[in-house]
Every structure is written in C-alpha cells, then in structure tokens.
Amino acid sequence: MAIYAIGDVQGCFDELLKLLKVIEFDPKKDQVWLAGDLVNRGPKSAEVIRFAMAHPDSVKVVLGNHDLHLIANAVGVNDYHHRMDTMESVLDADDCDVLITWLRHQPLFYHDKTLGFSMVHAGLPPKWSIKKCRKRAKEVEKVLQGEHWQDFFKNMYGNKPDKWSKELIGWDRLRYITNCFTRLRYCHDDGRLALKFKGEPKDKPSGELPWFEMPDRKTKADCIVFGHWSTLGIGQYGNVFSLDSGAVWGDKLTAVRIDKKKYKWFEIDADPAGLPHAKNK
C-alpha cells in the first residue's frame, strides 16, 4: 500500500488523472490524500468531486476555502463571488445537491494515527495540539452536517476574530476555527492570525511568520501536509510538507509519497490551454 498527498487540484481534473497515472495509483490498495480546494478556478470541479465520491476508501480529503466558497454560492450566499470563480460545472449539474451534500460532510482536518501524519488545507494556530485540532475541527463539521448548516455560510466570511480564546462562542468561534484550517498562511509574532498577506515569505510584512515557523507551535514534532499557498510552492519544512504548486495557474500538480520515510516527490505540468486563469495570478 502506498499513500500519496496531493496539493490543490481546484477543478484541474485532467491534471489529476495524469498525476495519478504517473504515481501508478491503484485504488484497490493505495490511498491519495487531497489537501483541500478540490474545486473552483479550474474547469472540471464536478468531475473532481465525483472522482473522490467514487473512491471513499482510497481518497481522503479535507475542505479548503474554495470548497466552502462553492457551498456558500450553492445556498445563495454570493456576496463574495469572485470574477475568477468557475463553479458552473457543479452549480449547473443535475446532481448538484448530491455533490454539495457530499462536500459538506467532509472533514476540515484529517489525522492518520497509524501513519503519524495529519492533513489540513491551510494551517494550524500555534497554541493547538493535534488533539485540539481534531476537537476544534469537529465543532465546525457538526454544524456543516447539521440541520441548520446554511446559516454557517451566512456568517463564515471575515478576518475577525484573529485571536483564539476558549471563551469564544457562536459564529466568532466557528469563523476563527474555519479561518485557521482553510485560510491561514501567516501569524503575527503574538500568535494572532495574519490573513491579509498572501505572498512569499521573503516579502512578508515585519512581525509576521509562516504558521509553521512559529517558535512556540505545539505541533512542531508532528508530520503535517498542507496546500493553499501557491506563492510558497512545494517543499519540506521540518516535518511540514507544502503541496500547492499552482496547477490552476498553469504550473504543476504535485504529490509526495508519505508512507515511507524516504519521501518521494512527483509532479506533472498543467496544460495552460485548458485552464481559464493560467498565468493570471
């Protein structure tokens, strides 16, 4: 059995199939982990979801910000619609309700105790252990899968609160948790979330650090794969693996095999001709 973690697919289904062929993925014995943002900006979001749905035992996913953004649009919360959004393959599909229902039942955080690896789309705040991450993720997942799940998306957007407190309640608490798992790149020196800057670490504002470089991070000894950060690109930072290589921008789609300590990387070139926003960062 081989286990591969793959960065943001974002509707680039043809590229996903090419990468699976390169790694010789066998769904009968292997696993692929998709690190969030299965959808949007690329042309075939519905096909990516259907592929994951068809392989429940061999494809593990976490939700990313674009996945949540798609669900928000599906329930009519489209005040934050972006000119580069390409969600029609899902929203106009005959099985749209099925696709959305499946998507909102996926986790925000995935942990494989036997393998000793965790997966998140964006990042983890420094004060949370893996145990706390699992617990916090389930708070949001319970709402997403509950009777009044539509209300979540009316209250999801926003950068505040940026500081964790056990006393946080209601939508503020859920928004903070969601922003960590699906949007985080940098933290302020004091641990507050810094959600505005999206660029490379060399250009970061003073007083901000990549979340995985926070000196007091409680998950420093834990192995974690994440996506979300195409300007960072791929790489290994201690026990942390960055996987977003910008496939949707016409760059590459990347996988890393994580079930062996000698980690092996794989990549394929995206086809800019089939991607509406290639090189349009």
Image: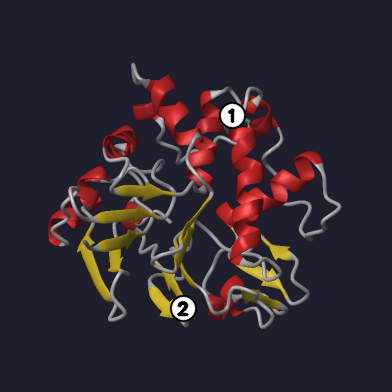
User: Could you classify mark 2 by the number of other residues whose Cα lies within 10 Å: few (under 14), some (14-19), or many (20 or more)?
Assistant: some
Residue type, mark 2 in image:
Asn
- Estimate the x, y position of residue 22 in percent, counting from the top left: 14, 61
The C terminus - image quarter: bottom left
Residue 252 seen anywhere in this rendered image of the structure? no
- Estimate the x, y position of residue 24 in percent, counting from the top left: 13, 58
Residue 265 seen anywhere in this rendered image of the structure? yes
Secondary structure under the numbered disc 2 in the rendered image: loop
**Count of marks, rendered view:** 2
Say how the picture is coloured.
secondary structure
Q: Which residue is mark 1?
A: 78
* 147 vs 192, nearest the viewer: 147
Q: Is residue 155 left or right of residue 29?
A: right
Q: Is residue 123 left or right of residue 45?
A: right
Q: Quadrant of residue 141?
A: top right
Residue positioned 23% across, 68% down in the render: 266
Contact (Cβ within 8 Å) of mark 2 with mark 1: no
- Estimate the x, y position of residue 125 in percent, counting from the top left: 66, 65
Residue type, mark 1 in image:
Asn
Q: Which residue is mark 2?
A: 239
Farthest-out residue, right? 167
- Estimate the x, y position of residue 113 in percent, counting from the top left: 46, 63
Secondary structure under the numbered disc 1 in the rendered image: loop
User: Could you classify mark 1 by the number of other residues whose Cα lies within 10 Å: few (under 14), some (14-19), or many (20 or more)?
Assistant: some
Mark 2 vs mark 1: which is more N-terminal?
1
User: Viewer-nearest of labels 2 and 1?
Assistant: 2
Instruction: Report, in whole angstroms, how far the alpha carbon at label 2 lies from the one at label 1.
Output: 37 Å
Residue positioned 79% across, 39% down in the render: 170
Above or below, comparing residue 268 to residue 136 in the picture: below
Farthest-out residue, top? 94
